[in-house]
């Protein structure tokens, strides 16, 4: 009698435990599937924290809602296959700086920040983005050295740095990017500091 009762208890326990294990397994798979986009969304939110002025409210929908981070719906962000691939925030008069969080956006193919008022140095982490094809930082206030790791980036096809503050001498590695198809730098600004134009529509066809 005791053996039968023990068997029934074991069967009942399995009936409770197995569905729970299945739910946990599905939850873990879902978390694993969504985590890349969530981590990239968190990186974008850290970037937003560095923006001290957003006169047009362009980043107003960059937020976490009910614990969910959904960059798919964010202005200026394009995603593909659950990955953030394009960041296009041109002509928005954003004021701030860039930080190491860009290293978390390892699937980015295009960063377009033309005609804003970003300042400070260009993070080394941007130079480590191996998928990056387009980097347009023209008409900002960037200063300091340019990341040397761009010399190892064979994906880069467009690099625009025109109308920035003193950038110093570009590392020789930059000129070794064999597949570079378009390269615009105001040579005068590589040696002399100059004032940046007021933020306005640049007219560039991006």
Image (spheres, grey):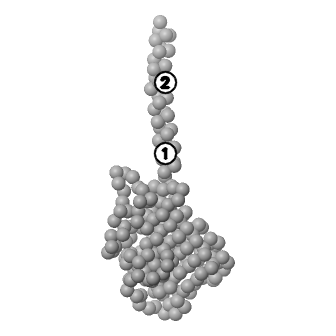
Mark 2: which secondary structure? Answer: helix
Residue 68 percent coordinates (x, y)? 39, 52
- Numbered circle sitting on residue 192: none
Does residue 182 appear to the left or right of 65 in the view shown? Answer: right
Q: Residues within 10 Å of mark 2 (few under 14, many from 20)?
A: few
The residue identified by callout 1 is 30
Q: Quadrant of residue 196?
A: bottom left
Mark 1: which secondary structure? Answer: helix
Q: Residue at x 60, y 75 (%)?
A: 157
The total of numbered circles placed on residues is: 2
Of circles 1 and 2, which is in front?
Answer: 1
Q: Quadrant of residue 16?
A: top left
Q: Residue furthest top?
A: 1
Does residue 75 appear to the left or right of 133 in the view shown? Answer: left
Mark 1–mark 2 distance (CA, rounded to whole Å): 24 Å
Residue 34 appears in the rendering: yes
Residue 42 appears in the rendering: no
Residue 60 drawn above or below residue 19: below
Does residue 94 appear to the left or right of 103 in the view shown? Answer: left
Q: Residue at x 36, y 60 (%)?
A: 63
Mark nearer the N terminus (1 vs 2): 2
Q: Residues within 10 Å of mark 1 (few under 14, many from 20)?
A: few
The residue identified by callout 2 is 14
Residue 195 drawn above or below residue 98: below
Q: Residue at x 52, y 93 (%)?
A: 188
Q: Nearer the viewer, residue 46 or 92?
A: 92
């Amino acid at each position: 009698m005791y053996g039968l009762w023990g068997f029934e208890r074991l069967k009942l326990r399995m009936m409770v435990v197995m569905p729970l294990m299945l739910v946990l397994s599905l939850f873990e798979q879902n978390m694993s599937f969504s985590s890349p986009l969530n981590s990239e969304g968190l990186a974008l939110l850290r970037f937003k924290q560095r923006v001290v002025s957003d006169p047009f409210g362009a980043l107003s929908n960059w937020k976490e809602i009910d614990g969910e981070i959904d960059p798919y719906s964010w202005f200026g962000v394009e995603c593909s296959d659950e990955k953030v691939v394009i960041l296009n925030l041109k002509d928005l008069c954003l004021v701030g700086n860039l930080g190491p969080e860009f290293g978390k956006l390892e699937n980015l193919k295009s960063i377009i920040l033309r005609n804003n008022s970003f300042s400070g140095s260009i993070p080394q982490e941007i130079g480590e983005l191996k998928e990056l094809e387009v980097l347009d930082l023209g008409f900002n206030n960037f200063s300091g050295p340019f990341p040397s790791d761009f010399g190892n980036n064979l994906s880069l096809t467009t690099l625009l740095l025109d109308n920035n503050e003193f950038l110093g001498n570009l590392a020789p590695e930059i000129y070794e990017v064999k597949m570079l198809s378009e390269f615009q730098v105001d040579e005068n600004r590589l040696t002399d500091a100059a004032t940046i134009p007021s933020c306005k529509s640049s007219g560039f066809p991006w």
